């Protein structure tokens, strides 16, 4: 298989000298011992402990520019920004090669691929043996969440990819402050940090695996340079390992955005929303209110666009932090219409992966709609529309969250923000209305557990296939989904003041195949109704599937909806829901005796109401 020069550079660039070689390591003996063990296995030419400084980053970027791993973009339009082209066979998460390695297979659950820990370690160590010969080994201490937050957790990723170092610097609190926290906490407990070992290997799909060891708080990833597979702080740590930690420590690690909605009275409600990848999380997190709402004084604040860690506070409410410090967003479809805040965020100091290029070296992707045209596609070839899109459908941008115009300073609050509502939503072309509210917490957990969505390009495999994706966590839950649902149910105890739960569907289509709801900024109209339900001053109609608004319950001023749109967006189709709940029952039964009876009872209750 032929590779572009930039891809060949990724396989060879690690052989070049590091910005500096440091062997002093840490004051924490356990960390030093692990780094020495990994160095003994991988046999690098040098070891570099990352401090996260500007000088270190500049040296790494210069190194990658020299060997072609990073290509400079137009400094007039995108200062401080770079393009990276990955291997054409390394462009998305590889769910079929991702394993959860627990002592007992049933603890991983049918929602995960399982391998016995001893076998997994042996397989991975055979791949890692000598893999960094001639390369530099980078040690990356990082913190997921604000450095001083009790909700944050730390990790250390070892990698031979400076591209990973540069991205982790944007995506986490990386470097000296994180190492200091690890050293403080490591004195008192053995689980002070998650151990992540990564190598780009040979970028061979036949020698590519991502192994998670929740019981050991460890990750091993080999053979991929793609973000979700290589940036181990992201999905691997922040969801798969953290979800396991959260269950044992009494909190929730979720695939959710966090957005603050400030009304004209200055009151802000924070909403956490779970959508599968490439289904609009970033767009909602950075939503810009419609003009009428802006004139009235509505504001939207972005706390996080992808991951949410929630913990009960002393008042019984759930408080959330965004464990990430940056955005690893999908570029295609991002435009001045869909997400102007995102577009403004990535105008400088960003790393783009697998986008096209214009003739004057501006990044380009389908849906950008800026009047420019691509000259080069994501593989580095002259753009030919007959040979595919200019940007890969899962092309990405990595950028600091603080560059977002709607970034909320509350993202740095160590105590987190109080969550008023939790929203679930998938990509459903039919049946599911625009929005409905769960009857109570148990019903809300069922709504999340039964969530379905059509697949997108964020993972390898067919696109557009409907699958159950509970809480948008199907690829990310680090243990048995049945136990995960039980954990969710456990929060409904004495003294709890839990958020209301809703379900949305921005993607309902009409008979002509077109979307019925305008989406984008107009989604604030739906959020306004949710906040009204939280406060008790918005109307709804009770149905077997939950509380639905009528068109009169939403502010639809300026929104032109056809009769078909009103009927399908706000309607309830009994026969279709009967079939849906029969399918949900079969899905729950698939998890066997571990499935909590409360969820099965709730499914039966609603199915009976639908049958009346």
Image (cartoon, grey):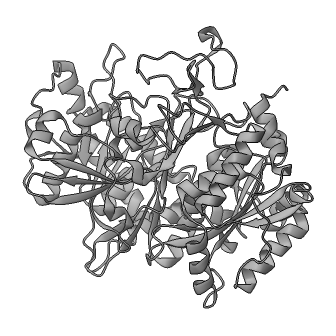
Where is residue 181 shown, x and y percent of the image?
56, 79
Residue 73 vertical placement versus 326 (above, below): above
Is residue 109 visible in the rendered image? The answer is no
Hey, which quadrant is residue 225 in on the image?
Answer: top right
Q: Is residue 130 left or right of residue 302?
A: right
In-image side of 512 versus 174 (left or right) = left
Location of the N terminus by quadrant is top right
Q: How many marks?
A: 0
Residue 354 vs residue 511, the one in the foreground: 354
Q: Is residue 49 above or below residue 592?
A: below
Q: Position of residue 300 (x, y in %)?
A: 25, 49
Relative to 78, 102 lies left or right: right
Residue 403's spot in the image, x, y percent? Answer: 41, 49
Judged from this view, the residue extending furthest toward the bottom is: 188
Percent of width and height locating residue 321: 40, 65
> In the shown orientation, is residue 228 left or right of residue 22?
left
Position above or below: 138 against 529: below
Q: Is residue 564 above or below residue 575?
A: above
- Whether residue 229 appears in this view of the structure is yes
Q: Residue at x 54, y 54 (%)?
A: 170
Q: State the quadrant of the C terminus.
A: top left
Q: Quadrant of residue 205?
A: top right
- Residue 86 versus residue 55: which sits nearer the camera? 55
Residue most extreme to the top: 386
User: What residue do we see at 27% from left, 24% from top?
Assistant: 516
Front residue of 113/276: it is 276
Task: Quadrant for residue 65, please give it.
Answer: top right
């Amino acid at each position: 298989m032929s590779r572009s020069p930039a891809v060949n550079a990724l396989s060879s660039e690690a052989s070049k000298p590091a910005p500096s070689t440091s062997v002093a390591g840490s004051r924490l003996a356990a960390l030093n011992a692990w780094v020495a063990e990994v160095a003994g296995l991988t046999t690098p030419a040098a070891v570099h402990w990352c401090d996260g400084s500007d000088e270190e980053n500049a040296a790494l970027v210069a190194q990658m520019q020299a060997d072609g791993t990073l290509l400079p973009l137009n400094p007039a339009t995108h200062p401080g920004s770079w393009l990276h082209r990955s291997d054409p066979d390394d462009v998305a998460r590889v769910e079929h090669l991702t394993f959860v390695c627990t002592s007992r297979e049933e603890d991983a659950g049918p929602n995960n691929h399982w391998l016995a820990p001893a076998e997994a370690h042996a397989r991975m160590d055979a791949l890692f043996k000598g893999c960094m010969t001639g390369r530099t080994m980078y040690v990356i201490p990082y913190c997921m969440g604000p450095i001083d937050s009790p909700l944050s957790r730390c990790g250390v990723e070892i990698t031979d990819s400076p591209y990973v170092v540069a991205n982790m610097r944007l995506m986490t609190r990386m470097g000296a402050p994180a190492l200091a926290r690890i050293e403080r906490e490591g004195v008192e407990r053995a689980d002070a940090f998650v151990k992540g070992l990564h190598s780009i290997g040979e970028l061979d799909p036949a020698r590519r695996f991502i192994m998670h060891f929740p019981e050991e708080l460890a990750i091993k990833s080999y053979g991929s340079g793609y973000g979700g597979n290589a940036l181990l702080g992201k999905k691997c740590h922040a969801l798969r390992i953290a979800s396991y930690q959260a269950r044992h420590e009494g909190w929730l690690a979720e695939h959710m955005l966090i957005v603050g909605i400030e009304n004209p009275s200055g009151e802000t409600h924070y909403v956490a929303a779970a959508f599968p990848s490439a289904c609009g999380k970033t767009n909602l997190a950075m939503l810009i209110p419609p003009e009428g709402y802006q004139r009235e004084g509505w504001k939207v604040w972005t706390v996080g666009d992808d991951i949410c860690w929630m913990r009960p506070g002393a008042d019984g409410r759930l408080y959330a932090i965004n464990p990430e410090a940056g955005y690893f967003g999908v570029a295609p479809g991002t435009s001045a219409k869909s997400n102007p805040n995102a577009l403004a965020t990535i105008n400088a100091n960003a790393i783009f992966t697998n986008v096209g290029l214009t003739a004057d070296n501006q990044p380009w992707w389908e849906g950008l709609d800026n009047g420019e045209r691509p000259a080069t596609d994501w593989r580095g070839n002259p753009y030919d529309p007959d040979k595919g899109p200019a940007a890969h459908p899962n092309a990405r941008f990595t950028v600091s969250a603080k560059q977002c115009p709607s970034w909320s300073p509350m993202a740095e609050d160590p105590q987190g923000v109080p969550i008023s509502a939790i929203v679930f939503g998938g990509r459903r072309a039919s049946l599911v209305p625009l929005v409905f509210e769960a009857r109570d917490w148990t019903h809300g957990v069922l709504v999340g557990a039964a969530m379905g969505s059509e697949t997108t390009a964020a993972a390898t495999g067919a696109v557009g296939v409907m699958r159950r994706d509970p809480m948008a966590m199907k690829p990310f839950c680090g243990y048995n989904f049945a136990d995960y649902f039980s954990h969710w149910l456990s929060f409904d105890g004495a003294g709890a003041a839990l958020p209301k739960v809703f379900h949305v569907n921005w993607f309902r289509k009409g008979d002509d195949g077109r979307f019925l709801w305008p989406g984008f900024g107009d989604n604030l109209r739906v959020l306004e109704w949710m906040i009204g339900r939280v406060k008790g001053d918005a109307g709804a109609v009770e149905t077997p599937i939950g509380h639905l608004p009528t068109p009169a319950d939403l502010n639809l001023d300026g929104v032109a909806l056809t009769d078909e749109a009103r009927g399908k967006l706000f309607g309830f189709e009994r026969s279709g829901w009967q079939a849906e709940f029969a399918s949900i029952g079969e899905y729950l039964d698939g998890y066997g005796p571990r499935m909590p009876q409360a969820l099965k009872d709730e499914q039966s209750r609603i199915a009976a109401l639908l049958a009346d």
